[in-house]
Image (cartoon, rainbow, N blue to C red):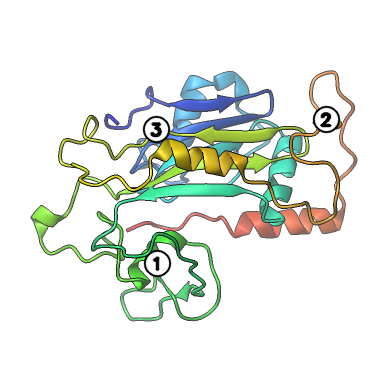
Amino acid sequence: MEPGSVENLCVVYRSHDFLVVNKHWDVRIDSKAWRETLTLQKQLRHRFPELADPDTYYGFRFCHQLDFSTSGALCVALNKAAAGSAYRCFKDRRVTKAYLALVRGHVQESRMTISYAIGKNSTEGRTHTMCIEGTQGRTHQLRVHCSALGHPIVGDLTYGHALGQEDQPFRMMLHAFYLRIPTSAECVEACTPDPFVPSLDACWSPHTLLQPLDELVQVLRAAPDPDPSEGGPGPCSPCTPLPGPGRPPPPPETEVQRASCLQWLSEWTLEPDN
């Protein structure tokens, strides 16, 4: 990928209610800081000024977050009802996400389950980072887990172990490759290109292919979505469309629903990335 700019926003999925973009590495999603010259929010305003929602602080409803250093699939809801439907999928753990990463060392296992809890690092000078002891958390989850396994992500200067300046690549090698959000009205599904190929980065030269990514995508797409916690139709089943132009308005949001949504949003607050 070429260096990020306000013009080179890559859209990999678009519908009446959602956008999925391929976020560039080293680009924040949004920021209140005046010094941020480039954010995804600014790219969206430049490309889709007509879709900006004046009722939101940033103009767009981001359904989830990606670290500043991470590239790949990120979903944007284009109205309040769509944001609510995506929120329920995340809340019920029905979202499927797959990442690509280049890690240090030689991983012996072809498959593993990681169950380390994540908590704030209390070490002096490291309070902005996370560690595997303590309470559960989402910030930097993949990066912390890879480091805990002894295979930190290449280019991760926070949790990695670079040996010198020549051992620090131009970006962190973590990419959100696949995303599926099975909302009640549509199955938002997107796959982004693999950025770790010689045609895009001449310094990267794969030696052994264990599983083609095309096969992985087929497995991900064939996998059933988890059942909704309260039952109901499947993610791609015909059902009542989301509210929009010419559609009936949604029922009023209850205080319990609003409190739950605010709690969910607070868990995705961006923190400084080092």
Regarding mark 3 in the picture, which secondary structure is present there? loop
Of pointers 1 and 2, the one earlier in the residue sequence: 1
As drawn, the label of residue 144 is: 1
Residue at figure coordinates x 90%, y 40% from the top left: 251
On residue 28, which mark appears? none
Secondary structure at badge 2 equals loop
**Residues under numbered marks 1 and 2 in contact, where contact means CB atoms less than 8 Å apart:** no
Determine the image quadrant of residue 162. bottom left
**Amino acid marked by disc 3:** Pro
What is the secondary structure assignment of the residue under circle 1? helix
Residue at horizontal 49%, vertical 32%? 21
Closer to us: 142 or 82: 142
The picture places residue 61, in percent across and down from the top left corner, at: 62, 39
Q: Given this view, does label 3 or label 1 mark the residue nearer the observer?
A: 3
Q: Which residue is mark 2?
A: 238
Q: Is residue 7 left or right of residue 163?
A: right
Q: Viewed as shown, does residue 157 lie left or right of 56?
A: left
Task: Measure the alpha-carbon separation of dots 1 and 2.
Answer: 40 Å
Q: Please determine whether, in this image, residue 229 is positioned above or below residue 13.
A: below
- Three-letter amino acid code at the position of disc 2: Pro
Amino acid tagged 1: Val
